Image: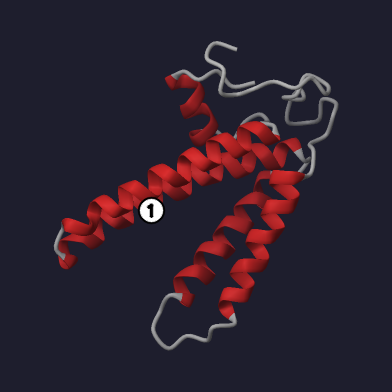
Amino acid sequence: MTRLTLNGVLDVYFSWKGRIGRAEFWAFGVALNMIWLFGTLGFAWVPMPIRMGPILIWYALFLFGSAGLLVKRGHDRGRPAAFSLAILVVRSVIWFVAIQPGEPSWLWLIVAALLLYVLVDYAILPGQKRENRYGPSPSGYGAHKNPLVLGA
C-alpha cells in the first residue's frame, strides 16, 4: 500500500513500476482529476493566445500522471504497460478530435466505451491475488487496507 508522503504520491503518478489496488486507484484517480479540473479552471483568467501553452503543459502533466496510475493498476490486473498506455493514447486522440468543430458526435461513443471499459476492468474488477511479474499483491492477499490513512 502506498504511503501518503510526497515520495509515495510521486511514485504512484510518475513511476510505472509495481502495482496498486482498487482503493488506491480510486483515491489517487479522484485526487488527480480534481487537481486537473481546478488547475484547468485556474487558467480561465488568462487571455486565450497565452493560455494555450500553459494548458498544453498542464494537460501533458495530467497525461503523464494518468499513465502512471493506469499502468500500475493494469499491472495489478496482469496487463503490460503498453496495454494501459494504448488506452490512454487512444482516448486522448479521440477526445481531441471529438472536441473539434464539425466532427461527428459518434466519436463520443468511442470515448464513452473506453471510459466504461476502464471503469469496469481497472476500477471495479479485483487484481490478481498473488504476486505476479509486476510485484506482490497490493492488497496483502485479500486484507482490506485504507490508502487514505497516513503512515499506514
Q: Is residue 133 above or below residue 141?
A: below
**In the image, residue 147 lies at what x, y percent?**
60, 24
* Residue 26 placement: quadrant: top right
Q: Across the whole image, how many numbered discs are drawn on residues?
A: 1
Q: Residue at x 63, y 42 (%)?
A: 71
**For residue 119, above or below residue 18:** below
SS at circle 1? helix
Image quarter of residue 68: top right
Q: Which residue is mark 1?
A: 59
Residue 98, x across and y down, in percent: 48, 76
In the rendered image, residue 30, in percent from the top left (x then y), is placed at 52, 42
Quadrant location, the C terminus = top right
Q: Residues within 10 Å of mark 1 (few under 14, many from 20)?
A: some
Residue depicted at 39% across the width and 42% down the height: 35
Q: Nearer the viewer, residue 89 or 8?
A: 8
Residue 78 is situated, as x and y percent measured from the top left of the image, at: 78, 40
Q: 144 or 21: which is nearer to us?
A: 144
Q: Is residue 111 left or right of residue 14?
A: right
Colouring scheme applied when the structure was drawn: secondary structure
- Quarter assignment of residue 1: top right
Q: Is 20 placed left or right of 148 in the picture?
A: right
Q: Is residue 111 left or right of residue 53?
A: right
